[in-house]
Amino acid sequence: VLLAVMYFYPKDDTPGCTAEACAFRDQYEDFKQVGAEVIGISSDAPDRHARFAGKHRLPFVLLSDQDGAVRKAYGVAATFGILPGRVTFVIDRDGVIGHIFSSQFRATRHVSEAIDVLGRLA
């Protein structure tokens, strides 16, 4: 059973979201070494995700949450009531959320937060 890092982000190919995705890509081997899988989630359509992942060589799965059901289930609120929230969840081997990090404007910090927490869970 794997650990999971599930990160919600606003939109493919925007500056902050691209920086965040590329930071997860650049540290992906660190995640794999501790047995963690990375999953990115936004409301973008699957074809847009495929283009985004290909363009930036993302080695992890991007899930489409076009109706916002997954975002709602995890309580990921909009920033300022309009911008989809940027929140990362670290989920342990038992499926329990071990850490939540929310920062709309510190996109790449989500990666270091997740790695720090995984170091304690692994």
Image (cartoon, grey):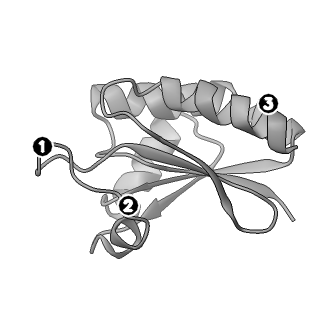
For badge 1, the amino acid type reads: Phe
Percent position (x, y) of residue 57?
58, 35
**Is residue 22 depicted above or below 2 in this figure?**
above
Residue pointed to by mark 1: 80
Q: Residue at x 40, y 64 (%)?
A: 46
The residue under label 2 is which amino acid type? Asp
Spatial separation of the CA atoms under disc 2 and disc 3: 28 Å
Quadrant location of the N terminus in the rendered image: bottom right
Q: Secondary structure at mark 3?
A: helix
* Of residues 3 and 51, the one drawn nearer to the viewer in this rendering: 3
Dot 2 crowding, Cα within 10 Å, few <14, some 14–19, many 20+: few
Q: Quadrant of the C terminus?
A: top right
Q: Would you name the residue on which mark 3 appears?
A: 30
Give me the C-alpha separation between circle 2 and circle 1.
Answer: 28 Å
**Nearer to me, 11 or 82:** 82
Residue at the disc numbered 2: 47
Image spot of residue 74 (x, y percent): 43, 66
Q: Residues within 10 Å of mark 3 (few under 14, many from 20)?
A: some
Place of residue 50 in the rendered image (x, y in percent of width and height, measured from the top left):
46, 54
Q: Position of residue 121 (x, y in %)?
A: 82, 44
